[in-house]
Amino acid sequence: MNHYVHIGLEMHCELSTQSKMFSHAPAKTIKEPNSCVDLLDFGFPGTLPTVNKKAVEYGLLICDLLHCEIDKNLRFDRKNYTYADLPKGYQITQQNHPLGKNGHYLVHGNKIHIQKVHLEEDTAKMIHKQDQTYIDFNRCGYPLVEIVTDASINRPDIACEYVRSLVLDLIYLQVTEGKMENGNIRCDVNVSVTKNPDSLGSKVEIKNINSISNMKRALDHEIKRQSELLDQGIEISEQTRRYDETSKTTVLLRKKETARDYRYLPEPNIPVIHLDESWIRSIRENRPMLPDELILMLNDQYGLSFQQAEQLVSQKELTDFFLKVIKYTDRYLDVFSFLMGDIRSWMKENHREILDQDPKVLGDLICKMDSKLSRQDVRTCIIPYLEHRSIDALIEKLESAKMDDLSLNLLIDQVLKENQKSVADYKNGRDRALGYLVGQVMKCSKGRSDPKIVHDILLKRLEEAV
């Protein structure tokens, strides 16, 4: 029996501002609980909110990315409910007048319809330990942008690719750190499975999914669960669930018997703010480059293939460092090779980032390759460089140990003489023999020669002999 899937997403994006959405407390993720707060965050009477201009600017950038209609009259609402993580008893949001609406986002040719983009403040963080609950108010008031799609997504892989692609764009816009594992991005997924393609059916919401892989597993399981219920003739009830990583299933949190009454009302302490058209235009004109634009630039100006450019751009930190290093060398492909090889491996193995490494040192090091250092020599210098150790003495030692041209040619003569069978194999069209001969030269030179130079010399010799 045919089943029709309807998926809608609500993405909460934590903005990378210096201060909170409506208070002057710093918006920083630090270890000490309740140290980045002020009286407004605690809901003290008499405190008044002030709108964070940078958060509005970031919100406008997101609206522009999503091709939304922008409301030039900035208005806020109160969402009233009582819970321990909300000391004021209400959340300031944009229920009735979102910053942007009626947008779209393309994912591999699939148009994702964006219902609205609105600004709001985050709640405090609740920490449950045994029979005790602790509250850290540092997060209370963090600026958030919520991006809401309609329910026209019909495949889990499209939903996951939408999140993956959008998060990368948001990172390059520099509006968020975009780390789902740190809570910078949180997703709620709405799923409805029906037998009628034109009917949405009962909506099931899966709350606070913290990774794209978990989103895929949660969607797959929930679609299977609802499909089996439909086949058994059991009515699907509207409910809120969560994804359990241990059992790889969605688990019931609560049923939605009736719509919750949040008693939305206009925020009385924030008057309507009229956004100037020239200010909005300047934000658009000065936005950072997006991944797709960078890929074209890397291909056109620096000779990277589209596949290489996509691979590099998938990690903004490496892309930023690449653009710094190439100011000191024109060996763009070698810079790419070391970044995506030795350097990325070191970052992954050591859980480290490229923070304040000097790009000039790496650029100068790569410039020495072939003329003074072999590729292996450069690789030998990479780890000490990443660990902020001086590599001057190491470079000097490697340079002095490098074989001179005369010694290298004599060694190649010897290898060719001792491996006549491989020479004959190459003459008979077995190209792999060349790789074997290169390996023999590298072995005899104990790594003191550059494999590319060895390859080129051997190739020339063998072609002349054919």
Image (cartoon, rainbow, N blue to C red):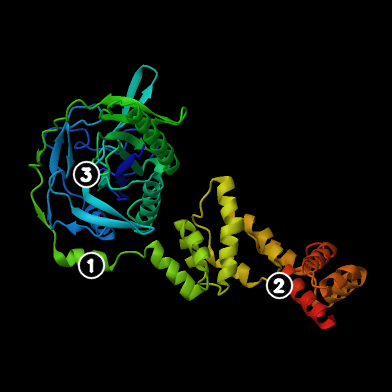
Indicate the position of residue 451 as horizontal and vertical percent values. 74, 68
User: Residue at horizontal 29%, vertical 34%?
Assistant: 205
Give the quarter of the image for residue 404: bottom right
Nearer to the camera, 396 or 9: 9
Q: Relative to 274, is 294 above or below?
A: below
Q: Residues within 10 Å of mark 1 (few under 14, many from 20)?
A: few
Which of marks 2 and 1 precedes in the sequence? 1
Is disc 3 placed on a helix, strand or loop? strand
Q: Relative to 225, is 466 above or below?
A: below
Which of marks 3 and 1 precedes in the sequence? 3
Indicate the amino acid at tag 3. Answer: Glu
Drawn side of residue 394 relative to residue 96, left or right: right
Indicate the position of residue 46 as horizontal and vertical percent values. 11, 36
Q: Alpha-carbon distance for marks 1 and 3?
A: 23 Å
Nearer to the camera, 432 or 31: 432
Which of marks 3 and 2 precedes in the sequence? 3
Which mark, by number, is residue 120? Answer: 3
Closer to viewer: mark 1 or mark 2: 1
Drawn side of residue 160 relative to residue 144, left or right: right
Indicate the amino acid at tag 2. Answer: Lys
- Residue under label 1: 282
Indicate the amino acid at tag 1. Answer: Ser
Indicate the position of residue 221 as horizontal and vertical percent values. 41, 34
- Residue under label 2: 372
The answer to whether residue 82 shows anywhere in this view is yes
Q: Alpha-carbon distance for marks 1 and 2?
A: 49 Å
